[in-house]
Image: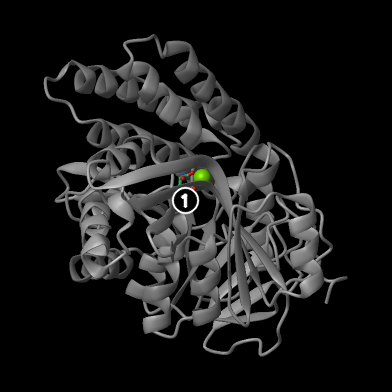
Amino acid sequence: MARVFKFGGGCLKDASEIKRLIDILAAESEPSRLVLVISALGKTTNSLEEIIKLGFEGKDFSSALEALIKDHCSIAKEVCKESEHVIRKIADIDLEIKTNLKELLDQKGKKYDFVYDQIVSYGEILSSILVFHALDQEGYKVDFLDAKEVVFTNARNRNGGVLWEKTQQAILDFMEESEKDIVVTQGFIGTFEKEFTTTLGREGSDFSGAIFASSLDAPSLTIWKDVPGIMNGDPKICNPKYVFPFLSYFETSELTYYGAKVIHPKTIKPLANKKIPIHVRSFYDPHASGTIISEKGLHEEVPTLILKKNQALISFTTKNFEFIKSYHLELIFSEVQNLAVAINLTQSSAISFSVVADFDEKKTINLINSLDGDFHCKYNFDLSLLTIKNYTDSIISQIEGSHEVLLKQQTRNTCRVLIEDLREDEKINIDVLENQ
Ligand code: ASP
Ligand code: MG
């Protein structure tokens, strides 16, 4: 039986962190085989996105690519005892990226999403090559698995839909043939019929971990994070003190729906279906117990803050003071469906209907333009949707005292407020636990 470990880019930023990964494996001396799902190092995916953007704008991307390749080569020197061979491989990939990107950009009718997937996927290839060689040269029995050989998706770029049966069979076949203790593969990437690369959506490596764990009927999926586990708030936006020891699949799905970043939303379902537990563990404190997500919930009401940034509020008001009726909603929702707008909250009043949706330059504007004939449309951008689960009156009044609230929705357990987007590094100053 193989266990699956997923390592995110947030905890693989430099050579010392790859060495830390090796130390973690050394301490995890269970006899079972391991599949390591590796995501791109640090901010590599963002850099590759920038390179693709420059390419599409007809600008020179060579220095941005050079910097990325240089970083990977210097890490190779530090983590691989015999680094020349690894550096040669990285140089081959450098050439491959340049050639592919140029060819793709020269093609007529090139589609951005298609080009994006072919190029952005190199981030994971580079990081997994480093981890593979570092482990191999450390004396581990390790195999390299290109995820494009086994993770089959439909042709949809940037959000590939997994073809589960085909994928499971391919993963099982590979594992049966491999005689190694550790298999290193990539998160985030897949293939359409081995013809071209697809990706599973930003931060999709957690989902890849779930694909491997579910296909292998693994005893667990371990997600190594740069936080101590799932906390009652994102440390980037507040100062949470509480690490959930347990969460149920249901509770975790809810948190990810509200915007918790700690796990990719798609990760839960395939594992919940097979009752495979997810263990979220601290990369920097591997002895800490972290969070176990399974059928067993916490049964304790801990106030929890979750923030979804970059939201748009759009209000559709009927012309001629007509009350909102179902046909108005039909008009709005058929456009929402056509444009694949992601709605996070709705609110209705006598003559207007408001939606809070993920802001997307094209989709949001198209939605407004296409309904402009039927309604008076008003909108605000650059907003954040703050959800407070198990709120207390004191938490709500602190938020209302420090932020302008554009919209509020409250049930017995959950309060959601729409506020201005936080500035870079701005925090919501509520000591959540003190307010219990
Ligand atoms: N490297 C990809 C990203 O940054 C996938 C992941 O990290 O999960 O979005
Ligand atoms: Mg990443």
The answer to which quarter of the image holds residue 107 is top left
Q: In this rendering, does residue 158 appear at all?
A: yes
**Residue drawn at point x = 61 percent, y = 75 percent:** 414
The quadrant in which the N terminus is found is bottom left
Q: Secondary structure at mark 1?
A: loop
Tell which residue pokes out farthest to the front in this image.
320
Disc 1 target residue: 203
Mark 1 vs ligand 1: CB below 8 Å: yes
Tell me where residue 248 appears, x and y as whole percent.
Answer: 55, 83
**Residue drawn at point x = 76 percent, y = 69 percent:** 287
Q: Is residue 376 left or right of residue 167?
A: right
Along the line of sight, the residue nearer the viewer: 137 or 197: 197
Q: In this rendering, does residue 162 appear at all?
A: no
**Residue drawn at point x = 76 percent, y = 70 percent:** 288
Tell me where residue 144 appears, x and y as whole percent.
Answer: 39, 51
Q: What is the three-letter code of the residue carrying label 1?
A: Glu
